[in-house]
Structures are given as structure tokens and as C-alpha cells.
Amino acid sequence: MSRRRVVIPSEEELERRNTVGIQAEYISNVQATDFPRHYPGEDNSWNIDKFRDGFRVQFHKNGPLEASFSLIGIHAAVANAFRRIMIADIPTLAIETVFIENNTSVIQDEVLSHRLGLIPFKGGREGLHSFLKWYKKKPNTATDNLGVSGDHFDYNTVLLRLQVKCTHNEDAAEGERDPRKLYHHAHVYARDIEFVPVGRQARYFSGADAIVPVNPDILIAKMRPEQEIDLSMHMYKGVGSDHAKFSPVATASYRLLPTIKIVEPILGADAEKFAKCFPKGVIRLRKVTRQEAAKQGSGYEGHEGELKAVVEDPMKDTVSRECLRHDEFNKKVKLGRKIDHFIFSVESTGQWESDAIFLESVAHLKAKCKAFEKQVINMVR
Amino acid sequence: MSRESYQVPTGNSPTFGGSAAFPTREFIPDNSVSTMFYICGDCAVRVPLEKGAPIRCQKCGARVLYKERTKRMVQFEAR
């Protein structure tokens, strides 16, 4: 029978385990090691109370289109799961089918359809998230002459129309060369797409809530006189894993918080050069005080009044490792990243709000776990 | 789920109402035998041409004529 010796690691050791090492040529200590049986004598089993005490969320920026926040005290697998769900599993409305009655422009039908699919749209929140449901294409459904099955309803399909004809502009000046002045509708923009509400859609998507492109100035096609584009479109809900046009985020990404540890004093001209190796605001220069100069063995003796380098805001650092290229101070500084501090950046394309996307991804992961739990219980029965 | 095999729609039968509230283009009946419009290769004017008629543009006399885009609706996936 072995003795159960309970070991409590020191603060330094905990910090060492929590930091990813960044050297000039490689990265070290990439994996989180706080799981059971990795360190003898320590109990690192996951504990909900320990997690709740140690977990924090800090918001840095929260605009409708871009949100930046930190998740502190979480494991990389969970943070990555949130990131992947935000990109691939949050439902969004986008153009899926294009019915072209006439297209005599130079843009080919399929290219035009592809471009239309990629245009991001926005609309009334309640209508988009709770009223509109998924469109399920049932196999073997009776289709009419145009291959459109009879299960499109106001709650799963949105109808849009684009009808533009390019004509000569009689009032253009003599010698005018700009095609936008010479012709009417020479350029077809996303704002030329009309939303056609059907049934109950008029109730949810009217006025400011209407389904319109997020960026009305997206150029779809260019035309010359006698050319015309006449088409209608169906929009459905989809997910990013099916096609990138359904992804609600321009991108969602995270980075780990950088750490800069100055182990030996960097003074004077070296300190100024050191500050230039980092983006503005990361390193601040402070004067050495008399108390610091008086301390034995601190390295500041005789340097009272000089400027020394102090780490001010490591979050602004982009970790270019420039300071490791200079021999004056590359031994005096240790670069690293905190292994459980994730700085998320969520950039929405306009249909969802950025913070709503993250909350939806948390809900989605929770639903997946619940479904999984049921199957695990089934397996064990 | 049709009992008969698929039959190619001929040019004379009108198509039924299209997607949602959008009508297809009108079928314009003609008195002459199948007069179709072609586009002249040089001057881009719409040239009406009957079956069996000599292939020439009326305005500029060019002998290269292009067919117009089909009046039928085409469906695409926006992918």
C-alpha cells in the first residue's frame, strides 16, 4: 500500500505550468498538464466548484459587429469548441436558389448566382431567430414544372427579386465617359435587391426590420444598354459547415494572453531600444527610485534616476519576438503566453450581434452535450 | 410521381405559373410560321427570320447571326 502524500505546488511552479514558453526558435510547454495522475501526489481532478471559482469573463469591446472578450480559466478544448461552433454551426439566412428569367449581362448565370449567395443580409431579430424555421427538402415530393417542391411556406423561405435594365441616359453631358452617368443602372448593387414579403413575413420583417443586405454598396454586376437582369431568389436558413455563405461571423478567433517577464533590469538606452521592440503601450519607461537603487543585489545600484523598462500592458503585444533578436537584452527577458487566458475576437457579418453569436454557441454546445449524455447512458445500459 | 415517362416540353406549350408571385414572360402568338429573332453579329440589332429565309442581317448585310438567350426560366444553386 503506497503512502498518500499530498503535494501542494508552489506559486512559482503553478505559474510555470500555466505559461507557454516562447523562445526565439520554438514554443515550449504547449499542453495544459493539470489533469489527474500527471503530477504524483496532486489531485487535479476536475471540480465544478474549483472551476466556478477560477473562471472569469472580461469584456474589452462590445459593438454590434465586433466583440472582444477574454475567457480566463478554461481549457483550450472548450474554447476551441466555442470558436468552431461560432464559425460552422450557428444558423444564418442566405440566398440559396436563384431563378433566372433573363440575364443578358456579361456575368454568366452561375457566376451571378454564386455572387448573390455570398451577400450577407440582416433583418428583424425575432423574425429571423424564432419565426423562420429550417427548410427541409423532402425527397420524392411532387414538383411543379419548374422543379420547385410544394413545401415552401412563409415560415421557411424568403423571396427576393432583382430586376434591373440598363438604358441610355439622355441627359448625360457631351463627351461624358463615366458609365454610371452615361447609362441608367450600369452598375447593379446589392441595394437593388427587393424584398418581397409573403404571408406572415410582413408582420416580422417590415420597416427597419426588413430583410436587406448588410452592405447595400456591394457591386453585383456591371451592364451596358440593352442588357437586363431579371431574377428572383429563395433564401433559406443554413449553417457554415454546409457552405461558407451561411457562417454568421466574418471570422471568430482567439489568442492567448502574452506574458513578458523582465528577469534582469534593462536600463538607459537599452530600455528605450527594448520599448521600441514592442507595439506602443506594451513597455513603459520608469525612473529608478532611490529605494530600488539602495536594495542590495537588485542590479539597480548606482543607476538611480535612470530609465528602466517596465511591462505596462501585455495584451497589446503581438508577440513578434523582436526583443529576442538583440543580444543586449534577449537573456534578460522571458516571453510566454498564459495557457488558460483566451482573448476572443468575434466579427459578425451583420445578421447576428457578436455577443449573441457567442451565447448561441454556448447554448449549442450545451445541447450537443445533453444529446451525447443520453447516448452514453444508453450505451451503458 | 408521374405514371407516364418524362416528356420534353415543346416550344408551343405555355409554362405554368412560376415561383411564388412572379409571372413568366408572355407567350406572344405570331401570325407567320415560326418567326424567331436573331442578333446580328456586327450591328447587334434584333433580326426577325422565318424558317427557310436567307440568313442575312437586314440593316448591315452581315451573315453571322447569333441566337437570342432562351425565354425559359433557369434555376441555379447559389453555391
Image: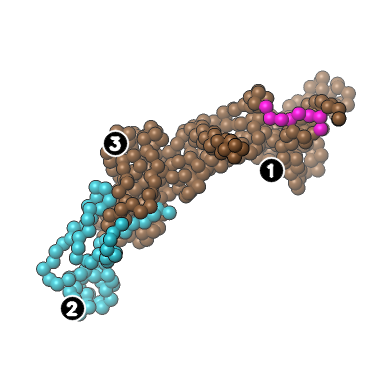
Chain colours: A brown, B cyan
As shown in the figure, which amino acid type bears the numbered disc 1?
Ser
Q: Identify the magenta region.
A: A40-47
> Which label is found at residue A197?
none
Most foreground residue, A325 or A157: A157
Q: Position of residue A84 (x, y in %)?
A: 56, 42
Q: Are marks 2 and 1 on the same chain?
A: no
**Residue A86 appears left or right of A73:** left
Q: Is residue A100 above or below residue A283?
A: below
Q: Badge 1 is on which residue?
A: A320
* Residue at 41% over, 35% down: A129
At a point 40% along the width and 58% down the height, the residue shown is A111
Q: How many marks?
A: 3
Residue A111 covered by magenta stretch: no
The answer to whether residue A347 is visible is yes
Residue under pointer 2: B53
Q: Quadrant of the N terminus of chain A?
A: top right
Q: Give the alpha-carbon distance from disc 3 to disc 2, as whole Å.
A: 54 Å
* Residue that numbered label 3 is attached to: A200
Of all chains, the one bearing label 3 is A
Q: For the residues marked 3 and 1, what is the alpha-carbon distance in whole angstroms?
A: 55 Å
Same chain? Circles 3 and 2: no
- The residue lying furthest to the right in this view is A296
Look at the numbered disc 3 and give the secondary structure of its residue: loop
Residue appearing at x 48%, y 32% in the figure: A356
The crowd level at tag 3 (other Cα within 10 Å; few <14, some 14-19, many 20+) is: few
Q: Residues within 10 Å of mark 2 (few under 14, many from 20)?
A: few
Q: Are marks 3 and 2 in contact (CB under 8 Å)?
A: no
Of residues A66 and A342, the one drawn nearer to the viewer in this rendering: A342
* Residue B7 image offset from top left, x and y in percent: 27, 65
Q: Position of residue A353 (x, y in %)?
A: 46, 34
Task: Identify residue type, mark 3.
Answer: Arg
